[in-house]
């Protein structure tokens, strides 16, 4: 079982800082592969491998990962104000949305 926690901290309307913590194989359980099915082999029925040998994910020991991201985007109101100035949005629609009129 894998687990992830995430937290966004907004500094202003358009700037956010994101912290994320992930844990792979939370319970640290061994995940074994299939037993040997070759009847003529000396190790018939013996499990000799784990499910995978990937760097992360299934079949690996418990692993923690931390990340941080910075997000900057244009806010909805500033985009609407830009559309209003360009003539793509009517004055009545802008008033209904609470955007100041452009002279």
Image (cartoon, rainbow, N blue to C red):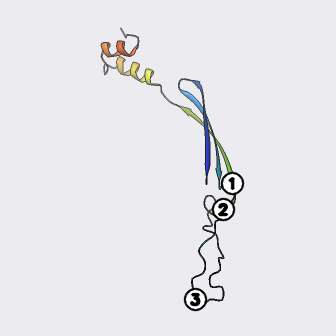
**Residue for badge 2:** 60
Q: Nearer the viewer, residue 100 or 33?
A: 33
Query: Marks 1 and 3, Cα distance to the nearest angstrom?
Result: 37 Å
Quarter-wise, where is residue 11 in the image?
Answer: top right
Q: Is residue 6 above or below residue 92?
A: below
Secondary structure category for the residue under label 2: loop
Residue 39 x, y percent position in the rendering: 58, 89
State the CA–CA distance, disc 2 to disc 3: 29 Å
Residue 60 % position (x, y): 66, 62
Q: Please state the extent of the stretch shown in magenta in the rendering.
A: 37-46
**Residue 75, disc:** none
Horizontal side, residue 57 vs residue 96: left or right = right
- Mark 2 vs 1: CB contact within 8 A: yes
**Dot label at residue 39:** 3
Q: N-terminal of the two: label 1 or label 3? A: 3
Disc 1, SS: strand
User: Could you say which quadrant of the image residue 70 lies in?
Assistant: top right
In the figure, 25 relative to 68: above or below?
below
Q: Position of residue 35 (x, y in %)?
A: 61, 77
State whether residue 91 is above or below residue 30.
Answer: above
Residue plotted at (50% across, 30% down): 73
Per the rendering, the mark at residue 63 is 1
Name the residue rendered at 44%, 21% in the picture.
Answer: 78
């Amino acid at each position: 079982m894998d687990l992830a926690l995430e937290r966004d901290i907004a500094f202003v309307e358009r700037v956010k800082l994101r912290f994320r913590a992930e844990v792979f194989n939370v319970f640290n359980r061994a995940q074994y592969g299939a037993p040997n099915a070759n009847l003529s082999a000396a190790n018939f029925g013996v499990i000799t491998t784990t499910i995978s040998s990937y760097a992360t994910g299934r079949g690996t020991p418990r692993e923690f990962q931390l990340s941080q991201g910075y997000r900057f985007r244009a806010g909805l109101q500033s985009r609407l104000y830009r559309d209003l100035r360009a003539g793509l949005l009517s004055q009545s629609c802008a008033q209904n949305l609470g955007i100041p009129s452009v002279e």
